[in-house]
Amino acid sequence: MKFIVHTYGCQMNVRDSEAVEALMTAAGYEKAESESDADIVIINSCTVRQKAEEKAVGKAGNMIAAKKLTGMMGCAVKRMGADIFRRLPKLDFAVGPRAFGLIPKIVGEIAASGGKAKRILEIGDDIVPSGMSEHVAGGWQAFVTVLLGCDNRCSYCIVPEVRGHEFSRPAKEVVAEVEALARRGVKEVCLLGQSVLRYGIRNAAWDGDETDFSSRHSAFPRLLRALSEIDGIERVRFTSAHPRGCTDELLAVYRDCPKVCRHIHLPVQSGSDRVLKEMGRGYTRGEYLAAVAKLRAFDPEFAVTTDVIVGYPGETEDDFEATRSLMEEAGFDNSFVFKYSPRPGTRSAALPDDVATEEKERRDQVLLADQEARGLRRNAALVGTVREVMVEGPSKRNPDRMSGRDGGNRIVVWDAPAGTKFEAGEKRRIMIEEAHAQILVGKPVE
Ligand code: SAH
Ligand code: SF4
């Protein structure tokens, strides 16, 4: 039988889906080329915003109508619980975000019953998924989940509810996983966690004594150092970060380990101290900006990207302007703007969702326009510099150009007529000649 996995949501879901593909393949199922070719469809769902959840549920409905053996996994399953079968009475199975390791067994049971098996729901709240270290073969980049769940309680956020408590995977296991990836040709790893700099805080990730490290944020820098010593690994990235974890020790890693990319995804959410406090983000505007300043003082080209929410309950024009000015001061290289969406059971869901839809839309557009101008300015400062780029492949927009990314995660393109031989994951040095808000254009240099 052939299967396909459809993924909604964040990188963590992308990674979980990849693990499921590896587990299903190991269990003897074949990956389908396309949806029409698949007997089994697994939908990895997101619930961070209402729209995301609706998309996944809608897709599952379509797959059921197309008579596929259909299962759902991921965050929406945990949020909806047994309700998911009220929305989708013919859904074959549903597993929570920490139970994906059970999928091959569940699919096997359903297939063996000839469609007579009971619908299966497995939430598996706080377990560590089996098969976490499994990867699909091939490719030069890989995601590696190092921190599961989240122990923060940001007022608007459903993630802690659906992904459970924080758990740091043992460092030994992570190192072994990355070593195995390196042996298979992986050159770049991106470490995943909701607030990944908290690695090793709730539960010790390293065996033995850690007293030679200066703070409770020591385990993550130590992990970065260990991973950057692995032969074959050329780049180490991670996401998402929090200003509290931007310690001197982390900075020392950037100084000592050239493989650790000088890019940080540091979601700010708001620039208003009043809103930040209500959100329970654990930093003030000043503390956030100080963290950015520290990174940029170390390296002015340090790429800093962020997430912002517009239209949080009670967000005034002044609050919004504070977000705008913070974004300008921080000089973000890129930003992702989200319109507030109340999520059931979160603290902020009890507050009136009082910023009108059109006003959320307007604020979104204003921030996007600001970012265009700022991105262009940040990129223009890189004209004349040489970027070290990992080749990804022909540019999607123009097949006569090759595309790759520099350490700051900036997209870099250069002329390479269609048909040019290339190896994805190869390193190239590109001299930047032209800047746009979203891409840099240049030419290869020796
Ligand atoms: N753990 C990450 C965020 C994970 S959710 C962090 O704290 O840094 C990804 C992004 O979705 C968040 O950064 C936030 O900007 C957005 N988001 C989360 N909940 C939301 C909600 N209820 N409405 C709108 N956007 C939301
Ligand atoms: Fe959600 Fe906050 Fe945890 Fe991020 S840190 S996942 S926004 S609760």
Image: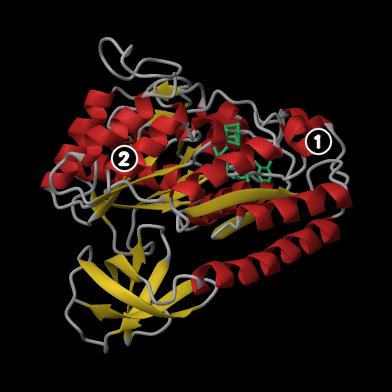
Camera-nearest residue between 199 and 324: 324
| Residue 178 picture location, percent across and down | 21, 39
Residue depicted at x 27% and y 48%: 259
Kind of element beneath mark 2: helix
| Residue 148 picture location, percent across and down | 43, 29
Quarter of the image where the C terminus is located: bottom left
Q: Quadrant of residue 266?
A: top right
For disc 2, the neighbor class at 10 Å (few under 14, some 14 to 19, many from 20) is: some
Camera-nearest residue between 119 and 407: 407
* 144 over 220 or under it: above or below: below
**Residue 132 can be seen, yes or no:** no
Q: Is residue 197 left or right of residue 233?
A: right
| Residue 190 picture location, percent across and down | 34, 46
Q: Is residue 46 left or right of residue 301?
A: right
Residue depicted at x 45% and y 16%: 202
* 112 over 67 or under it: above or below: above
Residue on which the image places disc 2: 111
| Residue 330 picture location, percent across and down | 62, 52
Q: Residue furthest front?
A: 297
Camera-nearest residue between 185 and 28: 185
Q: Is residue 298 left or right of residue 446?
A: right
* 184 over 98 or under it: above or below: below
Q: Amino acid at mark 2?
A: Ala
Residue depicted at x 26% and y 79%: 444
In front: mark 2 or mark 1? 1
Q: Earlier in the sequence, mark 2 or mark 1?
A: 2
Residue on which the image places disc 1: 274
Q: Where's ligand 1: which quadrant?
A: top right
The answer to whether the residues at label 2 and label 1 have Cβ atoms under 8 Å apart is no
Residue depicted at x 29% and y 18%: 206
